[in-house]
Image: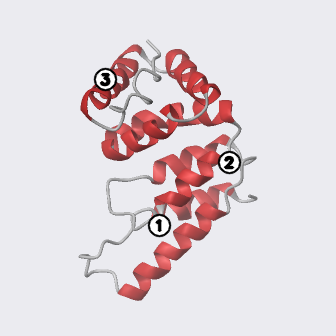
Amino acid sequence: MQDIASWRDEILALSDIPQDDDESVPLREAERRFNRFVELVDRVKGDDPDTVFLTLMETLKDQDDYGAYEGVFEALQHLQPARRGRLIADGMLPLLRRAPDLAGDVLTQVALDTDEVVAAFNRACAERALPEERRELSDFIAAQEHDGWLSHEAKRGRLRFT
């Protein structure tokens, strides 16, 4: 990707996906925006700079995405495992604060991923997050392990960094 700044500005603007009940956006315009968002996500490759993947995490919002986020999740899978774990950790707290349900979904993907991804995620959280941020994320993970996204035995206990 050549012009990352322009790509970032455009994809963030398009990440406010018009909802079905939003009559302020004509249907054709809503479809155009959605399709352009998907097109911009599809441009992402595994060798793009970290800022590209953190921007993808930033596009995830508490809204009906009509399937657009599947491309974001797929793009994250293009990353080398250790890098994927680290970048998801770097983008997790802002995601948790703006869209807890999506944060749970992403954490599930991490918990089900390879040991290398899980270790990189845990290490990045331990080394890069402030103590209060680690506590906030740990509390969320504990709640999800009790009765949420991470409550299945295969996911429980894999995300630990304190």
Query: Quadrant of residue 3 in the image?
Result: bottom right
Give me the residue at 43% from left, 83% from top: 29
Give me the residue at 49% from left, 40% from top: 109
Where does residue 54 sit, x and y in percent of width and height? 56, 43
Quadrant (top left, top right, bottom left, bottom right) of the N terminus: bottom right
C-alpha span from label 1 to label 3: 33 Å
Packing grade of label 3 (10 A; few <14, some 14-19, many >=20) is some
Q: Which residue is mark 3?
A: 142
- Residue 128 versus residue 71: which sits nearer the camera? 71
- Which of disc 3 and disc 1 is earlier in sequence? 1
Query: Quadrant of residue 44 in the image?
Result: bottom right
C-alpha span from label 1 to label 2: 22 Å
Where does residue 46 sit, x and y in percent of width and height? 72, 48
C-alpha span from label 3 to label 2: 28 Å
Which circle marks residue 78 in the picture?
2
Q: Secondary structure at mark 2?
A: loop
